[in-house]
Amino acid sequence: NNGGLIVKAFSEEQEILVVKSWNAMKKNASELGLKLFLRVFEIAPTAKKLFSFLNDSNDVPLEKNPKLKAHALTVFAMTCESAVNLRKAGKATVKDSNLKDLGELHYKYGVVDEHFEVVRFALLETIKEAVPEMWSSEMKEAWTEAYNQLVAAIKQQMKPSA
Ligand code: HEM
């Protein structure tokens, strides 16, 4: 049940574009994830405050923080997974953690629309720089759609845990 979300059709071509570029980026995923979040914090420095593990560990430089890398990798991988599921199931679904938990968690940590927008912008820039030879407006559109659908599904669940 996707709660009545209206989902734009995601084509096989779009899925292929996302999966193809993700496959090319995978081996550098942790480095790219880091780049992604450094870019996010450059644009929106206050977003750092949301991540409890960044506040507790001021002695560890940002770029060495394993949890930050893990989150960045999750955002990348789940967006790709979302692209595959969008095509197959016609809606954003996630495997490891369910959407309800994800929504409640992000609500609890105070993530707002603007954060999702900054991350989308930084995600697209990071991919563009990682695979310049593949990059196209169609590829940008495909990643944008996969990310937006995933975020819409998370946002629907952004409320206090019952
Ligand atoms: C935690 C996924 C976007 C901030 C998490 C977790 C997942 C996740 C799986 C729990 C485990 C972990 O830390 O890796 C996602 C996905 C996103 C997304 C799939 C977008 C598609 C964002 C955005 C922000 C954000 C835009 C804010 C800039 C956080 C914070 C936590 C968290 C603050 C808790 C970290 C802590 O334990 O202190 N996210 N996230 N997330 N996420 Fe996200």
Image (cartoon, rainbow, N blue to C red):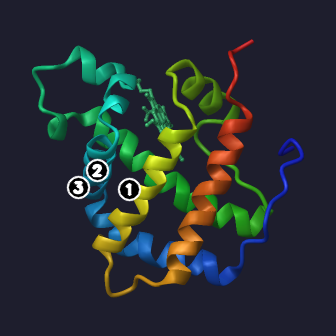
Q: Nearest to the eye among marks 3 and 1: give it.
A: 1
Q: In the rendered image, which residue does mark 3 sit on?
A: 31
Q: Is residue 1 left or right of residue 59?
A: right
Q: What amino acid type is highlighted by mark number 1?
A: Ala
Q: Quadrant of residue 131?
A: bottom left
Name which residue type carries label 2: Arg
Q: Front-most of 145 and 72? A: 145
Count neighbours of disc 2 (C-alpha within 10 A) and say few if under 14, some if 14 to 19, many if 20 or more: some
Tell me which residue sits at (63%, 65%) in the image. 145
Residue 11 spot, x, y in % from top left: 71, 78
Residue 126 left/right relative to 76: left
**What is the x, y in percent for residue 48?**
31, 29
Q: Circle 1 is placed at which residue position? A: 122
Mark 3 to mark 2 CA distance (whole Å): 12 Å
Q: Earlier in the sequence, mark 3 or mark 2?
A: 3
Viewer-proximal residue among 146 and 30: 146
At x 51% / y 48%, what residue is drawn? 117
First in sequence: mark 3 vs mark 1: 3
Q: Find residue 15 and report its horizontal and vertical position in percent.
A: 61, 75
Q: Are marks 3 and 1 in contact (CB under 8 Å)?
A: no
Asked whether the residues under the numbered discs 1 and 2 touch, taking CB atoms below 8 Å apart as contact, a structural biologist would say yes
